[in-house]
Structure formats: structure tokens, C-alpha cells
Amino acid sequence: MRVTILGNNSALPAFGRHPTAQAVSVYGEVLLIDCGEGTQSQMQRFGLRWRSMHHIFISHLHGDHYFGLPGLINSMSLLGRTAPLHLYAPAELKPILDAILNVAETILTYPFYFHALPEGTALLVDDPSFSVTCFPVNHRIQCHGFLVERKTRGRKLLPDKCREYEIPAAAYENLKQGEDYTGPDGTVIKNELVTEDGPSVKKYAYCADTLFTDSYLSVIQGADTVYHECTYLDADREKATKRFHSTAVQAAELAKMANAKQLLLGHFSSKYKDLDAFQEEASAIFPNTFVSVEGTAYEV
């Protein structure tokens, strides 16, 4: 499970940084979180294929988080997409997209499903391999963060060992669930002889534009990786509060409170060209901090 940063700037493109977008890869499935201007170009640049993407999540309706969406939706149709696409976003986005498509008399080549985000915390996707939960944050308009959880697939089979013990394929699913194998003659093959630990459960928390708050701490508690906006350095804490944003120090404080393992910083104000100070301020509180870099895939 990894997250690839496609855009980590706030408001507008600056200093080679793009508006917010990121792709979370889980067992080969790509989940797109936010879709700022230029997202589809960034996907092409960094080798992320939309054919592996079936779910898009939009945190809120400030343009730097969704202005790239109409173009991406249209491009996938022009390129002949047939697989369904599910969009989870504030309800007000649907008439905007409908108007853009209707005025051009666009008919999509694929089934397109719009799911309005609720006001509170809710399970949005419950797939056999992963789940996605939304949770409200505190911004100037309705805004949600997202928790992506990779589920375990059970034990991992060792094919050579299975063949060595002459275990039929029909028994493989039970082996993945941790069961021993009993042969026709009653011989018991212990599970640990033919399997090993599979992928563990992983939690990735995307904390979108928000004031510093612990209101969603229980949702992201114990996350392996937290991505938290830090639009400003701590010298501008008052400005951050007035604009419903957070600072690098506040992002680190929240990650520490959440007992997270790793913190990614993003959504930087265009007033900052050099981001080294963000690393310095946050890592003094939460050492395992990284200033996100576009095009970098971070292991969750």
C-alpha cells in the first residue's frame, strides 16, 4: 500500500508544485483523493493508470481540490473507458458536472455513479481488499478527510511447499484462512509449513483542509501514515486560524496525538518557495515526518 503525491500546493500552482491530488494504491487498485488542476497530466507523468481507478474522492469544493475533475472524467471517456467509475463528493458538485457535460452534449462511454458525502463520519466503500471512511474536518465550508484501510488477505501460500506436501488447490482457500490441511490418510499438515504471514492491515489517513482540531482523532487513531495539511509555518498560526488551516507544528502535534507511525506534510501556501522549515518545525515534535514531494510514492 502506498500513496503517490500528484499535487501538494494550496490554492494555485507555484514553484513547480501543483494543487492537491494524490493516488492511494491498494493491491493494484488506484484510489484518487482530490483532483486539483493538472491532475491527469500528473498521472501521466508519474505512470498512474486510470484503468486501475474505480473510485474518486473529493474532500470539498474549493477549486484547488476539484478543478481537474471535469477534464479527467471527459478524457477517460474519449479514450474509451467502459468500466464503472464512482465519485464521492459534496452534493453540490453533481449539478456542476452535469452542466459541464450537458452544455457540450457529452455522453460518457462508461457508467458514472455520483455518491453525495454525508455530513458526518460514514463508511463509503467496503471492498474485500480495502475500505474507505469519510470524516468531517473543520474548514470554512463543508470538508471531509478520508481513512483508507487495507484489509488483510489472510495467510500467503508457499506454492513450492504446497506441491511438496501434495496439497490440492481446492484446499488453498482454507490454508489462507489459517487452517491446517488434513490429507486423505488423516495426515495433518500444519498451516505454518505451507504458508507465511500475509499483508497486514494498514491505515492511511488523509486530513484535508482544516483548522487544528482533535474532533476526528478517534477515527485516525493508530494510523500507519497521516497526511495532514500544513498551509503555514507556525509564525503564521494566527493567519492559519483565520483561514481555517493548520501549521506544520499543529500537523505534527496531531500525528503525535494519533499515535501515527508516519506523517506526510502537504498543502503548502504559495508564499513559501523553500519548504525546509516545514520539516524542521514538524520533526521537532514528530520525528518521522516527511515534507511530501510530488511524484514520490510513500509506503504506508
Image (cartoon, grey):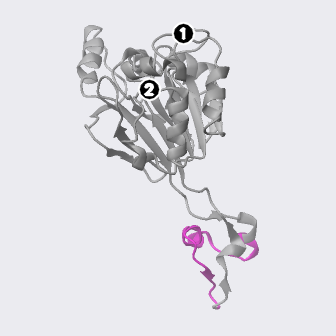
Cα–Cα span, label 2 and label 1 = 22 Å
Mark 2 and mark 1 in contact? Answer it, CB < 8 Å. Answer: no
Q: Which residues are magenta?
A: 162-185
Which residue in the structure is indicated by mark 2? Answer: 34
Amino acid type, callout 1? Lys
Left or right: residue 221 versus residue 135 is right
Specify which label sits upstream in the sequence, 2 or 1. Answer: 2
Name the secondary structure under disc 2: strand
138, above or below 120, in the image: above
Residue nearest the observer in this picture, 140 or 34 = 140
Which residue in the structure is indicated by mark 1? Answer: 271
For disc 1, the neighbor class at 10 Å (few under 14, some 14 to 19, many from 20) is few
Q: Residue at x 52, y 47 (%)?
A: 223
Question: Looking at the rendering, in which quadrant would you find the C terminus?
Answer: top right
Left or right: residue 96 versus residue 64 is left
Left or right: residue 43 versus residue 61 is right
Q: Residue at x 24, y 28 (%)?
A: 91
What is the x, y in percent for residue 245?
42, 24
Amino acid type, callout 2? Asp
Left or right: residue 96 versus residue 211 is left
For disc 2, the neighbor class at 10 Å (few under 14, some 14 to 19, many from 20) is many
Q: Please tell me whether residue 127 belongs to the stretch shown in magenta.
A: no
Residue furthest bottom in the image: 185
Q: Is residue 29 among the parts visible in the rendering?
A: no
Task: Name the quadrant containing residue 137.
Answer: top left
Residue nearest the observer in this picture, 227 or 276 = 276
Circle nearer the viewer, 2 or 1: 1
